[in-house]
Image: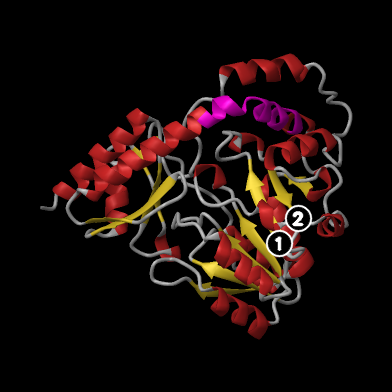
């Protein structure tokens, strides 16, 4: 008898392609929206000082009490309104399991692809509602879609990945007030722009906010995300949370990062300045269209095929994201250091001027 594990998998999971990113060594990496600056040396020294206090033979604090208190002070909510995860991905998966499994959820597309993937893994059907021409959202259309699909979950990214635009607080509040579904607002890039939704938490118990240490705080390698919601919703999700989901080292390092907030704010201002430099520079290139952004990345397209532009940039050791079928014809680049941003502008200028 021949054993084939694929035949034993749920049928709807067999079509999912494993996440296997291509490796492009020796390139300037501007494709993943990461913080391009080194982790602050003084914060790194503090992490080293506290390392001997991390008790590696013991399981981590399952409730991440100390980190949750630090996050609560940073964002201005109660610790009971915070839950942490092994990256925001884990928390998205919990939400899909709890409120989507066996039913539908609504996603405003184009957006972060992991919403759709986690939904499928959790056994939920993602109803993707196209954004408007300017990539904005219509709150009445979204509310009707939730009602029509009998969805228990609506996911909205603001600033939206990959388009970069943020949704106003007024629109988000209109959505919250018009549906009884759980409304998830993913604010992974809030430190770079957009409007903070935390003032709405106590007014709307159906609001969930997702945030992360991966982008602005430069801790993508440690995978620390967090969720803000009502205490009741947090307690409900604790029913399905893995007991020791965030390791002791990551809990400690994220807490240290919050202690060096002024240093990180300086980085954020530099990233925003580099982003604005890129926007201004490439907007002047022939055949290049640039879209407004509130994040640390820029959506753009050219008169050339997006795949061709991607390859021409790679040939000059610059890696950006070709959005492919998610947003055909478009590319996304995140702001790097000043030198990296200048190198990208020069490379794109070379690419588009080659075909003049």
Q: CA distance from mark 2 to mark 1?
A: 6 Å
Residue 207 bears which disc, if any?
Answer: 1
- The reply, left or right, for residue 75 in relation to residue 195 is right
Residue 229 bears which disc, if any?
Answer: 2
Q: Residue at x 19, y 49 (%)?
A: 285
Q: Which residues are magenta?
A: 251-265
Q: Could you tell me which quadrant the N terminus lies in?
A: bottom right
Residue 302 bears which disc, if any?
Answer: none
- Is 212 above or below relative to 113? above
Residue 78, quarter of the rendered image: top right
Q: Residue at x 71, y 46 (%)?
A: 226
Judged by its main secondary structure, the magenta piece is helix
How many neighbours does mark 1 have within 10 angstroms: few (below 14), some (14-19), or many (20 or more)? many
Where residue 17 appears, as percent x and y from the top left, is 57, 60
- Is 332 above or below relative to 96? above
Secondary structure, mark 1, is strand
Instruction: State how many labels appear.
Output: 2
Q: Is residue 260 magenta?
A: yes
């Amino acid at each position: 008898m021949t054993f084939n594990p694929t035949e034993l998998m749920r049928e709807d999971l067999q079509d999912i392609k494993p996440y296997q990113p291509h490796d492009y060594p020796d390139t300037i990496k501007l494709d993943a929206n990461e913080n391009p600056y080194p982790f602050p040396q003084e914060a790194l020294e503090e992490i080293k000082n506290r390392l001997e206090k991390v008790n590696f033979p013991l399981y981590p604090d399952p409730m991440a009490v100390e980190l949750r208190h630090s996050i609560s002070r940073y964002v201005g909510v109660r610790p009971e309104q915070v839950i942490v995860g092994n990256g925001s991905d884990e928390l998205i998966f919990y939400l899909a399991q709890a409120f989507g499994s066996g039913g539908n959820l609504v996603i405003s597309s184009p957006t972060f692809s992991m919403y759709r993937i986690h939904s499928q893994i959790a056994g939920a059907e993602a109803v993707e509602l196209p954004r408007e021409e300017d990539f904005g959202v219509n709150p009445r259309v979204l509310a009707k879609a939730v009602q029509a699909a009998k969805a228990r979950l609506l996911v909205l990214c603001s600033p939206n990945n990959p388009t970069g635009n943020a949704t106003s607080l007024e629109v988000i509040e209109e959505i919250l007030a018009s549906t009884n579904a759980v409304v998830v607002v993913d604010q992974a890039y809030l430190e770079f722009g957009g409007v903070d939704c935390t003032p709405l938490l106590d007014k709307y118990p159906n609001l969930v906010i997702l945030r992360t240490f991966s982008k602005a705080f430069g801790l993508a390698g440690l995978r620390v995300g967090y969720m803000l919601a009502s205490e009741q919703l947090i307690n409900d999700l604790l029913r399905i949370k893995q007991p020791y989901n965030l390791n002791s080292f990551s809990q400690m390092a994220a807490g240290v990062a919050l202690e060096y907030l002024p240093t990180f704010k300086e980085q954020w201002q530099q990233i925003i300045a580099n982003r604005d430099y890129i926007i201004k520079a490439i907007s002047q290139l022939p055949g290049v269209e640039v879209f407004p952004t509130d994040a640390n990345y820029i959506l753009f397209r050219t008169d050339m095929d997006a795949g061709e532009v991607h390859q021409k940039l790679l040939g000059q050791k610059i890696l950006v994201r070709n959005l492919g079928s998610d947003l055909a014809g478009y590319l996304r680049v995140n702001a790097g250091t000043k030198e990296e941003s200048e190198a990208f502008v020069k490379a794109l200028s070379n690419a588009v001027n080659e075909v003049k």
